[in-house]
DNA sequence: CGGGAGGTTGACCACCATCAACTGCTGTGG
DNA sequence: CCACAGCAGTTGATGGTGGTCAACCTCCCG
């Protein structure tokens, strides 16, 4: 109960978890009324979760699936020498465990980065849904393929780009996907990430992330006080970041020049 | 016609492309006779391909699907400053374009790394197959999820590990997956990669890959003359590489200690 | 014989990691 | 109310890993 914000932007006036999911799936495959009804009748069980709650742990077997209703989450893996690599972020409306739905064991961790809420669903229910609603099944499969495309871009990001570009690119993806959820405009962004988490996502150190953020600010890509970012020039930021949103496959704002 | 080896190990005594595919899918989901029949009757059209043949180009729409019958292929992306990142390798038997099957445009390139042969199949045929054979659909979806798991491990590899470990890890994955295809033992390996390609896969430079290979040889992880590698101590190589094959989800040799 | 691709080695240097000190903020308990 | 701890962020000094540039080698193939 503690640690979750139920104040002025309480959950009652936000879209429900099923609405978020429907919105997202409809972007991928147009659903019919029967599909939407089937989704609305799924027996989700809501859980209010605190920051750092581990939702799935590497090596365990996964028997239920996890829809992010509020807040932000990340998937990460560890190297043997103890370094953590964040491999994906999740936004409200993301069905986070499609990646594990057909695999016997989790190969990475899933952790809340902020407080929030998740909606659990037994995997058996998800499989029944997929069997009875082919369009939903296709939307789920497409979503998993978009995830994979994002992974490929991350490999490129950490493998080929220098530190400044990497940080900028990560920010661009976060902003683009965040806007797609429809909660906020692009220009203003409350980034729910510590600099250490940005470091773990980009393969850098927190110290160097800090320096890159300062340089990006000095170059006029954005301004920020704390984690409140203001994107003054989206075109400039995209250019610095080498950000081409085609890899998001239409699940985020596709075009938007200077 | 030129550039393909039809000599002593010609294609006639190798498993056919459908046999390779069946073998692979059966590892993921046990198929029934009707499933196998349906796959055998797919109208594949074989093409002999030379080295460096581009099978799919980024930004194009994909209308057919590509089964690797012989040789090796790689997927790669380019950053704006012209650096190439290889994001995946493919072995004979891999249905290489599941990743693009539901997405409107290719987000990366697919290129042959050796000469070989591919079997093309219209995507419409693949979709019909998936609709009529749920077990095959599940196997295909699972294969795509295993691919995604491999992408995640690559993010970890380039994001967290030092150069020596990275190169060793890439070799381990290649060896493990190659043995799973069943063509060769682990101990001997003809690596179909230039050092420049290893560099593009690990986010290093060819010069530094060369140095790392020399160090790994000096440490006794393997010996090699040219691209002929002999793995003297698989346990030692795994240890140096921080290689834990769980992320391959059983599509390669799972256990094998020192 | 010549050309080109891939591989090998050395010299040098830059980017980023590491270590350390210090700040500001927030929550907690005296 | 202040004291204090703890976390996130900030900045500087220093060093190492890996990039860059260049030369040269071998092998293969025309």
Image (spheres, coloured by chain):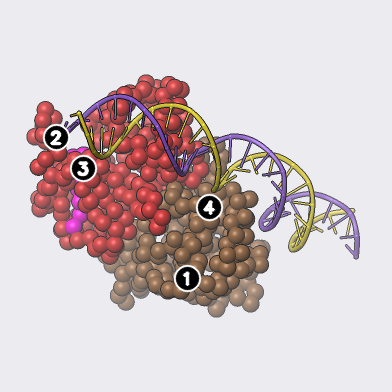
Chain colours: A brown, B red, C yellow, D purple
Q: Chain of mark 3?
A: B
Q: Residues within 10 Å of mark 2 (few under 14, many from 20)?
A: few
Q: Where A128 falls versus B203 (above or below)?
A: below
Q: CA distance from mark 3 to mark 4?
A: 34 Å
Q: Chain of mark 2?
A: B
Q: Mark 2 vs mark 3: which is more N-terminal?
A: 2
Q: CA distance from mark 1 to mark 2?
A: 50 Å
Q: Chain of mark 1?
A: A
Q: CA distance from mark 4 to mark 2?
A: 44 Å
Quarter of the image with the N terminus of chain A is bottom right
Residue located beneath label 2 in the image: B5
Magenta highlight range: B64-72
Find residue B164 and report its horizontal and vertical position in percent: 46, 33
Residue located beneath label 3 in the image: B51
Q: Nearer the viewer, residue A26 or A39?
A: A26
Residue located beneath label 1 in the image: A235
Find residue B17 and report its horizontal and vertical position in percent: 15, 42
Q: CA distance from mark 2 to mark 3?
A: 11 Å
Residue located beneath label 4 in the image: A163
Residue D24 located left or right of residue A169? left
Which residue is found at the position 32% from the left and 59% from the top?
B107
Front position among marks 1 and 2? 1
* Main secondary structure found in the magenta portion: strand
């Amino acid at each position: 109960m503690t640690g979750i914000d139920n104040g002025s932007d309480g959950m009652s006036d936000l879209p429900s978890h099923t609405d978020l999911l429907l919105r997202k799936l409809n972007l991928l495959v147009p659903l019919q009324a029967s599909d939407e009804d089937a989704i609305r009748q799924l027996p989700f069980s809501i859980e209010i979760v605190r920051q750092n709650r581990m939702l799935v742990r590497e090596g365990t077997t996964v028997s239920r699936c996890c829809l992010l209703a509020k807040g932000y989450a990340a998937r990460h893996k560890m190297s043997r020498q103890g370094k953590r690599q964040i491999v994906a972020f999740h936004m409200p409306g993301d069905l986070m465990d499609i990646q594990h739905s057909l695999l016997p064991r989790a190969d990475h961790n899933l952790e809340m980065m902020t407080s929030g809420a998740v909606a659990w669903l037994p995997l058996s229910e998800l499989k029944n849904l997929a069997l009875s609603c082919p369009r939903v099944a296709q939307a789920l499969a497409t979503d998993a393929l978009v995830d994979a495309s994002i992974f490929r871009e991350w490999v490129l990001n950490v493998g080929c780009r220098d530190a400044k570009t990497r940080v900028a690119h990560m920010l661009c993806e976060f902003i683009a996907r965040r806007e797609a959820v429809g909660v906020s405009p692009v220009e203003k962004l409350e980034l729910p990430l510590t600099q250490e988490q940005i470091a773990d996502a980009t393969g850098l150190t927190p110290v160097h992330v800090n320096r890159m953020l300062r340089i990006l600010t000095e170059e006029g890509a954005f301004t920020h006080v704390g984690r409140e970012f203001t994107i003054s020039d989206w075109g400039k930021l995209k250019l610095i970041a080498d950000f081409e949103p085609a890899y998001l496959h239409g699940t985020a704002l596709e075009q938007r020049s200077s």
